C-alpha cells in the first residue's frame, strides 16, 4: 500500500538529537543528488509536522519548534552588523564533536547562491499555530520565551523599508524556488506566507494580551496587504481586458493604471487562456511589471489563508479544472506555468542547467503541492478535483520510488536530477489522504482561514 510505504519513509527520515526526535531529513535516498538532503529543512518539515499532529505524535513537533528557535543564535554576522533575532535558518543537521552531539544550522552559507531564506520563519509560525490547534498547549505558547521570539520575528518582518506598498520585497532564490527564476520583487508565494504569518502572530500575541500597539499595527498591515493583493494581483477575463486597454504614463492620485503597466507586457500565451469562469493571482507585481506566470503554491496558500476571496478561490479552482493538463498533468502539481524558454530562460535563470524548460522549478511537477491542493479543493467544495488529483498520484508515486519532482510539460517523466524517497513527497500524500477521508483532520486547515470580506 502506498500510504504504508509513505509512513515508512517518514519514520526512517526522523532525526534524533540527544535521544529525542527533532525533525525529518529532506530525503531518505541513500545516495542523494543534493548532499544536504540529509538535513532537516524548515519548509520541508511542514507536511511531516502535519502528519505527526494528525497522528497525535506532537512531541517531535514541539522539539522541532524549540530547537529551531534556539538555532537563531548560530546566525553568522558580518562585522559591523547586528544579528536579526527573528531570522531562522534554512536547515539544520546533527553532528558529532568530541564525543557529543550538537545541532548545526545553515543560514544560506552552505546553500546554492548563498541566499538567506525569507520563508523559514513564516513556515515556523505556520507549524507553531498548527501545533497549538492540535494540542491546546497553552503553556508553551504563553511562555515568555516563545512570546518574545514571536515578537522578534514580527520586528524583523515589519521593519521600515523604502516601499509604498504593503507587500514584502525579496530577492531571487529566497523561498521554495531557491535558484534564479526571475522572481525578484514581490512574489505571490511570499505575500501569501507573509499574510498568514501576520495573522498568526496577531492571534498568538492576543492570547497573552500582547503589545496593543503592535497588534494594532498588525491589523492595519493585514488589511492593507489583503486589499492590495486582491486588487493588483488578481486577473480574470475582465481584468485582463482592462490591462489590455490601459493608458500608460498616467500621473496623479486618481489614475486607473496605478503601477504604470504597459499593455505590451501581456504575454502571447495569455490570449484565450482565461475563460469567463476562471482567474488567478499573478506570480509577481511591481512598478511597471506584471509576471503573468501561474505560481501554484502562492495561489493555493492564498486560498487556504483567506488572502483570496471566496469568489476568487472558485475562479482559481475553475482554472485548474479548465487547464488540467497544463497545471496538473500526469503527476500533480505543476509548480509554475508556463516554463520560460530561449533567451528569457538565459536571462531569468542565468542559463541554469537544472532549470531548463519543464524541469525542476521551471515548470516541473511537485508532488508536495498535493496537500495544499487537496486542502484548497475541499475548502472550495471541489471534492471532484481533490479525488482526481489523489487518483493520479497515489499508485504512480510509489512505483517511481517517491521522487522529489517530475519533468515534462505534462509531468510524465521522473525529474532527471530528482532525489528519491523524498520525505515531503511521501508526507504530502499522507496529509492529502487524511484530510480527504476524515473531516476531523480538516480542522488544522479550516482554522487557518481568515476571511474578512
Image (tube, helix red, strand yellow):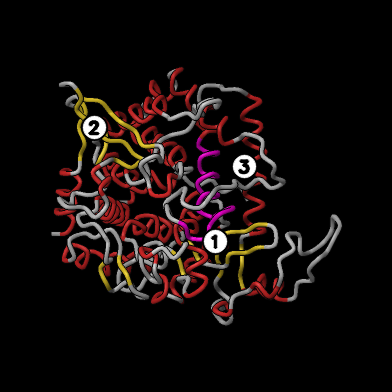
Segment colored magenta: 180-200
What percent of the width, then of the height, locates residue 63? 29, 29
Give how far apart the Cα atoms at labels 2 and 1 are: 36 Å
Give SS at disc 3: helix
In this rendered view, identify the residue nearer to me: 45 or 437: 45
Give how far apart the Cα atoms at labels 3 and 1 are: 20 Å
In-image side of 309 versus 411 (left or right):
right
In magenta stretch: residue 193: yes
In this rendered view, identify the residue nearer to me: 359 or 53: 359
What percent of the width, then of the height, locates residue 169? 59, 47
Please say if 408 is above or below 38.
below
Which residue in the protein does label 2 denote?
94
Q: Crowdedness of circle 2 by 10 Å Cα count: few (<14), some, many (20+)?
A: some
Mark drawn on residue 283 = 1
In this rendered view, identify the residue nearer to me: 315 or 293: 293
Task: Determine which quarter of the picture holds residue 218.
Answer: top right
For marks 2 and 1, give the one nearer the viewer.
2
Which residue in the protein does label 3 denote?
222
What percent of the width, then of the height, locates residue 90? 38, 40
Q: Crowdedness of circle 1 by 10 Å Cα count: few (<14), some, many (20+)?
A: many
Residue occupying image coordinates x 50% and y 49%: 305
Please say if 262 is above or below 197.
below
In-image side of 353 versus 18 (left or right):
right
Amino acid at each position: 500500500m502506498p500510504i504504508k510505504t509513505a509512513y515508512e519513509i517518514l519514520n526512517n527520515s526522523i532525526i534524533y538529537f540527544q535521544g529525542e526526535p527533532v525533525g525529518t531529513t529532506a530525503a531518505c535516498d541513500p545516495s542523494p543528488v543534493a548532499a544536504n538532503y540529509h538535513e532537516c529543512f524548515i519548509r520541508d518539515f511542514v507536511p511531516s509536522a502535519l502528519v505527526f499532529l494528525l497522528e497525535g505524535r506532537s512531541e517531535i513537533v514541539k522539539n522541532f519548534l524549540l530547537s529551531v528557535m534556539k538555532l537563531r543564535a548560530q546566525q553568522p554576522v558580518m562585522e559591523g552588523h547586528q544579528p536579526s533575532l527573528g531570522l531562522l535558518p534554512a536547515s539544520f543537521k546533527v553532528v558529532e564533536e568530541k564525543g557529543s552531539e550538537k545541532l548545526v544550522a545553515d543560514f544560506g552559507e552552505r546553500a546554492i547562491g548563498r541566499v538567506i531564506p525569507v520563508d523559514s520563519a513564516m513556515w515556523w509560525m505556520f507549524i507553531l499555530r498548527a501545533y497549538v490547534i492540535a494540542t491546546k498547549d497553552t503553556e508553551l505558547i504563553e511562555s515568555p520565551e516563545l512570546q518574545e521570539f514571536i515578537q522578534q520575528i514580527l520586528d524583523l518582518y515589519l521593519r521600515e523599508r523604502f516601499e509604498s506598498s504593503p507587500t514584502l520585497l525579496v530577492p531571487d532564490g529566497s523561498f521554495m524556488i531557491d535558484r534564479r527564476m526571475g522572481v525578484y520583487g514581490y512574489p505571490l508565494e511570499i505575500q501569501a506566507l507573509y499574510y498568514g504569518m501576520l495573522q498568526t502572530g496577531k492571534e498568538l500575541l492576543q492570547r497573552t494580551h500582547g503589545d496593543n500597539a503592535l497588534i494594532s499595527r498588525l491589523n492595519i498591515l493585514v488589511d492593507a496587504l489583503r486589499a492590495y493583493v486582491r486588487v493588483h494581483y488578481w486577473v480574470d477575463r475582465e481584468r485582463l481586458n482592462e490591462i489590455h486597454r490601459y493608458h500608460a504614463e498616467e500621473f496623479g492620485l486618481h489614475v486607473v493604471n496605478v503601477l504604470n503597466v504597459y499593455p505590451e507586457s501581456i504575454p502571447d500565451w495569455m490570449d484565450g487562456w482565461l475563460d469567463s469562469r476562471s482567474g488567478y493571482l499573478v506570480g509577481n507585481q511591481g512598478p511597471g511589471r506584471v509576471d503573468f506566470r501561474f505560481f501554484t503554491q502562492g495561489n493555493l496558500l492564498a486560498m487556504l489563508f483567506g488572502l483570496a476571496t471566496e469568489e476568487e478561490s472558485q475562479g482559481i479552482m475553475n482554472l485548474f479544472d479548465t487547464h488540467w493538463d497544463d497545471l496538473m498533468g500526469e503527476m500533480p502539481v505543476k509548480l509554475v506555468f508556463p516554463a520560460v524558454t530561449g533567451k528569457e530562460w538565459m536571462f531569468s535563470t542565468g542559463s541554469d542547467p537544472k532549470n531548463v524548460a519543464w524541469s525542476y522549478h521551471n515548470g516541473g511537477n511537485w508532488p508536495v503541492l498535493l496537500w495544499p491542493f487537496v486542502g484548497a479543493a475541499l475548502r472550495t467544495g471541489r471534492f471532484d478535483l481533490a479525488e482526481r488529483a489523489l487518483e493520479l498520484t497515489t499508485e504512480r508515486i510509489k512505483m517511481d520510488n517517491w521522487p522529489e519532482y517530475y519533468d515534462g510539460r505534462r509531468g510524465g517523466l521522473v525529474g532527471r536530477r530528482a532525489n528519491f524517497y523524498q520525505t515531503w513527497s511521501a508526507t504530502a500524500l499522507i496529509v492529502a489522504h487524511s484530510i480527504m477521508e476524515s473531516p476531523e483532520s480538516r480542522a488544522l486547515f479550516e482554522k487557518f482561514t481568515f476571511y474578512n470580506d
